[in-house]
Amino acid sequence: YLLIARNLAGGHGFSLNGLPHVALSPLQPLLVAGLTLAGVPLLWASKLLAAVAGALLVVPVAFLARRWYGERAGLAAALFAAASPALLTFLPFFPGERWNLYFGSEPLFLLLGASAIVAAIRATDDGGWRWWMALGALVATSYLARLEGAVLGLALAVATLVSLATRGKPALLPRALAGALIAAAVVAPYLLYLHGALGRWAVSGRVQAAAAVEQATAEPGQGGGSEAVRAFVWGGDQEALWRVLYALDGSGTRMASQYWGVPRENFTTVAAGEGEGEGGSPRRALTGRSQTIPPRPSPSTHAQASPPRLSPMRVAWRALHAVLPWWFLALALGCVLGKRRRGDQVLWLAPMLLTAIVPAALAYVEPRALLMLVPMACVLGAKTVDGLIEAAVKRWPVRWIAPVAVVAVTIGLLVPTARDLGRAWSAATPLQQVARARRAVGEYLGAHLPPDAVIVSWHPAIGVFSGREWRVLPYDSFERIAGYARAQHAAALVFSRFEPSPLREPPRAFTLVLLDSASAAAGANVHLERVDETPLVFVGRLAPEPAP
């Protein structure tokens, strides 16, 4: 997302890996790009957008709870939404020891989706033009934030028509049509962009990219993209995902998966090994020391021969538990199973439920896809807590019961976040240390490579912090990786001990291989002539293999 936003702000269009991008939705990087043009640094622009969207989510959640259950439930729902652990893990101190649920476009999508439900309720209540216009715009922007917005939009359209029909308000149908036209006008530019990039009409390039991966990488007896993601998320089989998502195409000059970009019609490639890097070498002097690094027998040692297969019900439970604490889920179910329910409560909460369930049923269950259940649970849980407070007050008529009960639930929700904060406060968790190392390597490249240099790395953070054009590192042998990098006119390859690498015994945690005009072609062994060396980074240039 950060790299796409940087390309947008730099006038390079909606692109990633040097190609037009179609897999990720455009709204979040568009807003981040706008903030950077206003002077906000790239990373802080993304953090600011996530923080503001996450904070504003309490407003529609409080509205829904207040509408159905009263003032006290509205306040409780707002506090629960503000404290839910799954909605706090985008914070900078998240140490990566639990599910990383909330980042990228999720905060923005949840805010827009919940606000669209509020707009639909207000539009069908008073019929005001402004609410119908707001409904169309919010549905459209939620779709532009995440593909799940298409499911939300369809579900809301059905709910709105049912509400108008059951309440006898057919006169509002022209206004509903006007809201639909607003939505169509907002999404039309993106749909036209997808058509231009893919050569066909589509609601998302993610589906197209997944289909291309399935076709390009499927082998007899092996699953394709969806199965690989499922094996990675629930079975820990990283290699399955790497082989699907990070594979080179048959030419060896670009990635097979369209997740990394759609080839332009005028896209030209340079034969592997023939191109010369456009970037210069580091400014430090060549010392003449050389080192031969034997390649790995296979690209990785992380392969898992038989990842565990879990039943769909167990997978669904694990995903739900990752999003909602079991005791808070019980509070929400207490409202569902209760006797007092508003009729329109089911009508308007159903779109939230479908937005979480339909993508999981069609593709695979991933905890982040279930995040729309969290604001829904906050509304329902607030009703249960409010009912328990009413029962307690009737038995013990004291004023402090209500605030103590709401604060106790809020504190209970904050416990996981407080525990993570305690672990991460010293900035010594493994994920934080690796992240600092990636940033240091990126800044090193930014200081030593020309501004127009292209770098190839597995992790995009290297590209973000170097401020250089980025290409993804394929999962392949060193010889094929070097050929791909030359075809992309790359100036440097970045290998790391923390990600898949063809180097079996790298001299440092990070190995930078320069691909300038002085570099030799890749051979059976990776022979590097030292250019620079730090405790973190070894910088070398490809050199001919020494004579036996």
Image (tube, rainbow, N blue to C red):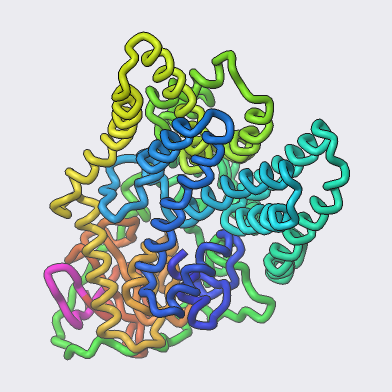
74 vs 493: above or below: above
Where residue 70 sits: x, y (%)?
Answer: 52, 31
Residue nearer the viewer, 156 or 80: 80
Residue 447 screen position, x and y as percent? 25, 84
Image side of residue 75 versus residue 132, left or right: left
Q: Is residue 193 left or right of residue 541?
A: right
Question: In the displayed structure, would residue 453 be above or below residue 203?
Answer: below
- Residue 487 seen in the current view: no
Q: Could you tell whether 388 is left or right of 14 in the image? A: left
Magenta stretch: includes residue 63: no
Q: Main secondary structure of the magenta part?
A: strand
Q: In which quarter of the image is residue 513?
A: bottom left
Instruction: Name which quarter of the figure residue 413 lies in.
Output: top left
**Residue at left 31%, top 40%?**
98
- Residue at 72 percent across and 71 percent down: it is 196
Examine the structure image and report whether residue 533 is included in the region drawn in magenta: yes
Percent of width and height locating residue 205: 64, 59
Q: 173 above or below 362?
A: below
Q: Give the vertical position of 525 relative to 391 (above or below).
A: below
Q: In which quarter of the image is the C terminus?
A: bottom left
* Residue drawn at the location 72% of the way across and 41% of the way down: 125
- x, y percent for residue 90: 36, 51
The residue lying at 26 percent from left, 74 percent from top is: 527
Number of numbered callouts drawn: 0
* Residue 403 quadrant: top left
Residue 51 in sight from this viewpoint: yes
Report the magenta residues as a range: 527-538
